[in-house]
Image (cartoon, rainbow, N blue to C red):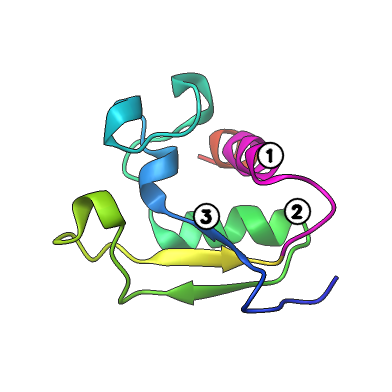
Amino acid sequence: MAYDDDNAIVLWPEYFDRNRTRSQGRRLPVQLCVDKPDLDIIAKGAMILDLEFKIFEDKSYPADWAAHAGCVRVEKGKISKSELLREIGKTLVANS
């Protein structure tokens, strides 16, 4: 599939931050998270999975709107968002 901005999956760095709790936005088990994830390593994970993506540096996670950490929007593939998060998390842990 090609990247479509209307159907892209949004990946926030907060999803992969092992220092956050689930209520603070972490979406994965701690074993699949890294310390201080940034947009570049999330994009690298999408690249390893051969997915098209765009980086948006001026966006803010809704629960932490003052941080302006940005987000990565990834093409919607054949897997669900939760499966995509797990696969990206595995690549982040393997490459950190």
Q: Within 10 angstroms of label 3, few (less than 14), some, or many (20 or more) residues? A: many
Span highlighted in magenta in the image: 76-90
Q: Are marks 1 and 3 in contact (CB under 8 Å)?
A: no
Image coordinates of residue 30 in percent, x first then y, are: 44, 22
Q: Which mark is residue 42?
A: 3
The residue drawn where x is 34% and y is 38% is 25
Q: Which mark is residue 87?
A: 1
Q: Are marks 2 and 1 in contact (CB under 8 Å)?
A: yes
Q: Is residue 42 above or below residue 52?
A: above
Q: Which residue is mark 2?
A: 49
User: Mark 1 and mark 3: span between their CA atoms?
Assistant: 11 Å
Disc 2 marks a residue whose amino acid type is: Leu
Identify the residue at the far left of this view.
66
Identify the residue at the far front of this view.
6
Q: Nearer the viewer, residue 55 or 3?
A: 3
Q: Is residue 1 left or right of residue 30?
A: right
Can residue 20 be seen in the rendering of this structure?
no
